[in-house]
Amino acid sequence: MSKSRRNFILNIASIIVLFLILFLFNTYGTDYQIRILNNIAVFIILAVSYNLVNGICGILHLGPNAFITIGAYTSALLTMSAAEKQMTYIIQPLIWPLSVLQAPFVLSLIAGGFMATIFALLISFPVFRVRGDYLAIVTLGFGEVIRVLANALQSVTNGPLGLKGLIPYTNLWWSWGIAVITIIMVQKLIHSSYGRAMKSIREDEIAARAMGIDPFKHLLLAFLISAFFSGVAGGLLAHLITTISPTLFTFFLTFNLLIIIVVGGLGSTTGAVIGAALFAWGGEALRVVERPMELGFLKIPGVPGMRMVIFSIILMLVIIFARRGIMGRNEFSWDWLLAKLRLGERG
């Protein structure tokens, strides 16, 4: 059997095993466990798509919260009925045709992704005229502009009141299904000629240009794909928490995504997946340190916010002892796993 065929079979088998595990959790798991698994999947989508720009292309992009906001509001508005919109928009009525439009959940996710992509295309021309810190500032400013507009445009977003009572369409099948699609598509892109060109731009843009590679074309492609999946993830997030407002999409969300891809390893899709899983699960697991504990004769009172202190310490330790992140720029491969298993058998 050829290596490519073997890897394909192993990939399909691993996806089947993943969805069998999800089926067991969906059937026998608690609502809390299912919620954490959904959170992990959404953060995987965000981290993998964000890593495409920051890690593969080497561009410091600080505005993914803007695309998440656009996707979340677009998807939410399309799934709400006309009666729900009329009851929600108290101060100012929702503008036409959004006031009468309604679409199925899957179409609303695609629309959220496309709206985010359109905004990404519009800002790409001024964004890619600069590099380095200047590009980071421009994208950071775009994120803040979208957040301010979400507060101000009451006839579109309902302003600070936000949108409440959304139907919780997001489940394990939607979230993890899209997460798997995101990983596959991004990996296919990375291993294509476009992906190799993106990596060459990351290493030396001048040399890449001298070899006939158009930096704008390749950076734009990565930027648009990242924006699309960020918008889709925003729609999933909106229908997971069922309540959205501008305060949910601050720079803190971007900061969390930056932590995830740095800890996982910039330029590694595997690292982005691991970082997202550790972030989403670890944040909940550390809640135990905020509860009162009795250790024999010693009583430790619960300290609100302590989990973030411990989380920050863990983050510093990872950065100190693994400066390139958990995976660096390495990726998981079946060859590596099978080689390790063979060594274990010999031992």
Image (spheres, rainbow, N blue to C red):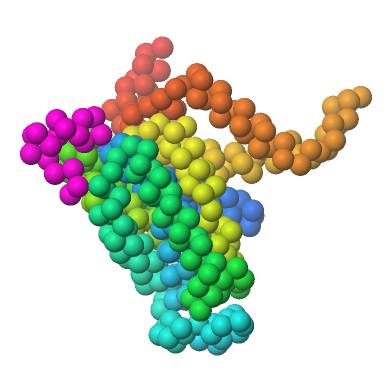
Q: Where 263 falls versus 345 (above or below)?
A: below
Name the quarter where the N terminus is drawn: top left
| Residue 224 horizontal/vertical position (percent) | 29, 55
Nearer to me, 60 or 253: 60
Which residue appears at 85% of the width and 35% of the height? Answer: 301
Identified at 7% across, 39% down, the residue is: 212
Quadrant containing the C terminus in the rendered view = top left
x, y percentage for residue 250? 54, 53
Left or right: 286 in relation to 23: right
Question: Is any part of residue 48 visible from this angle?
Answer: no
Picture quadrant of residue 168:
bottom right
- The x and y percentages for residue 272 are 41, 39
Which residues are the magenta region? 200-217
The residue lying furthest to the top in this view is 347
Quick one: 34 or 143, which is closer to the camera?
A: 143
Q: Main secondary structure of the magenta part?
A: helix
Q: Does 233 sit left or right of 10 as displayed?
A: right
Q: Is residue 77 visible?
A: yes
- Residue drawn at (31%, 57%) of the image: 123
